[in-house]
Image: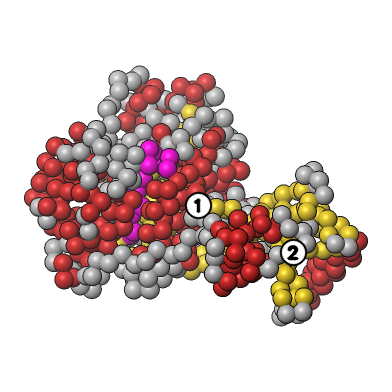
Amino acid sequence: MAKSSPPVAQLSTEDFMASPEDQDGVIPVAPPVPDPRKHVVLQIVKGHPDGVTAADIAAALSLSHPTAMRLLRELEREREIYSRQLRSIQVWYPNGRMVHPHLQATKELRGKTYRATVQEGRSGPLVQVQERSYSLLHGERVDGAIFIDYAALDDFVQLLRELAERYERFEENKEKSRP
Amino acid sequence: MRTLSLVDRVGESIVGTSLFSPRFTGVQVGRHVPLVRKGEDVEGLLRANFLGTDVPVELNLLQVRTIRAALARGSTLAGASKSWRDPASFFHSRPSIAYIPPEALTRPHPSAVAALGGMGSASTAIAAIRGASADGAFWTELARLHLYAPWLRELLVHARSMGNSLFVPPVPVVSRDLPGAALLQGRINLSAAAIRNGFGSDPAIPGLMYALHFHPSGLADPAVLNTVLQQFGAIIGRADNDFWGVHVHFTDIGSVSEITAAKDVVRESSRIATEAGMFTWVSDTGAVGPALLDEGPAFSSYHPGLSFRKVYADAAPASLDVQCGKVIEVWNYNLQRRSDLGRKGWKLDDTGLFPNVVPPNLRTCSPRAFRVHFGKPSNVAVAERLNTEREKELVKVGNARPGQSHLGRSRDPRIVPWA
């Protein structure tokens, strides 16, 4: 079988229509693809436990200041890094480093993937829980995450149990109140 | 066009209803449904009386003549409801999708080329070009001769005469040999929508599905898949697009080796379509369809013979036993030959929908009679039973991947890799 003919790539929507005026034939602009620079920014922040500023990132990667800020804020939303305001400067720090590769567990619950890790925090160990997803368009990504102090883990689990019990009582009462 | 209404979502799996036309508005999603490849499949379906008229069906439009003939033969069948027996209402009475098997447009078998030509004057010209051209040259010639529009109109009129609700336009199939198809596919989908709009608001002319068609070799390059999906997302994301849903098809699913990529494509296209409020139909998936439903489409279709072969291929000389086709068992999910059933005492797992014991007169009959009277309706019964089990697993148990769990029970080497 012959390879593709070069003209194929140049064929347009109008080439296959009876009347070109029927439609504009314009392919809309594709949605934005994930920014590969974000990964590089994360590596830089991880390499500087004492913190970096947006200006440092902008200089290191020849980015504009707003672009560096956008990438840092996206990483902060994903709980990969965090920031502190030191006088008039915002400084960005890496979130806790995993204590040991063994201290990581991944579980799929009703189709969603959760990854829990024990990390070193500034004032003691932390448990990080990430909700993760994979897509062909965006690769693997973190949809959201929370940190809980390891010392408060039992209290946190207790909080969830109390909420679950409260919900079950609510459902029971709803059932009873039905005519 | 918003054609998908979700009630629940467990993982990627969806629960809800879809819209096929103003006549079919609340069609339940999350189902593995029959595909009529040829007339004999209709004869098998005519024996599956348990199948409700709310179950959508896919139709190979190239076989309208043999399908009409089979419907006429089946019109005398006792026990079938009128809607099934009447050739004019068989497809009209239920939601249905007509398509041209994409294998006829990529490295086609001579019998596929012959089938392409049997639909009218434009189709005759199309078949002549298809038979004489490589994949890329075929589409270049169609553009040069302005043949696509008359061909599509001819096909739409055939689909209208069959009472189909929706139609899948023929598009270039993404393959290793035709990477340009990644972009051309979207452009031709847009052309098809404009041509369909030329019929105005005639409700009898089927609405269009967006076609995402792949040759197994086209799944190897993530960059090409990314291009196809980006373009699909951009077109389908427009509020004024003219599509009712997306039709995903892998030509020759039995030879797909990039199974993870195939699942990724189904999952990603379903996510994009769902976000745009449209349903996804994954076509001709055979016995592995339930696993693909776990990736988020509304429907997967299967040929009742559960063949892993193309529609049009060389008929290899085979023993009578092989010609009898395969029958699948609902619980262990293995494909059995007629001789295998004989060794098991002619008894299968009970679906509660169709007799699970092969009648004595079918144990030694011709292969065709076995397929029509037992094999195909039995396979349809298994799919229907699994649809019921799927709903229970999703809604009551919360299992986000009931299809893949079920395929995991099989020992069949063609099924297991999809689990």
Outermost residue to the front: A59
* Residue B313 falls left or right of residue B274: left
| Residue B150 badge | none
Say above or below: A61 vs B222. below
- Spot occupied by residue B408 in the image (x, y as percentages of width and height): 60, 38
Q: Which residue is mark 1?
A: A136
Side of B253 where B144 appears, left or right: left
For label 2, the residue is A51
> Height in image: A176 above or below B149?
below
Locate residue A52: give its quadrant.
bottom right
Q: Residue at x 24, y 66 (%)?
A: A25
Residue nearer the viewer, B314 or B223: B223
Classify mark 1: helix, strand or loop: loop
Judging from the image, mark 2 belongs to the subunit labelled A
Q: CB of mark 2 within 8 Å of CB of mark 1?
A: no
Task: Identify the magenta region.
Answer: B209-221
Q: Residues within 10 Å of mark 1 (few under 14, many from 20)?
A: some
Q: Earlier in the sequence, mark 2 or mark 1?
A: 2
Q: How is the image coloured?
A: secondary structure
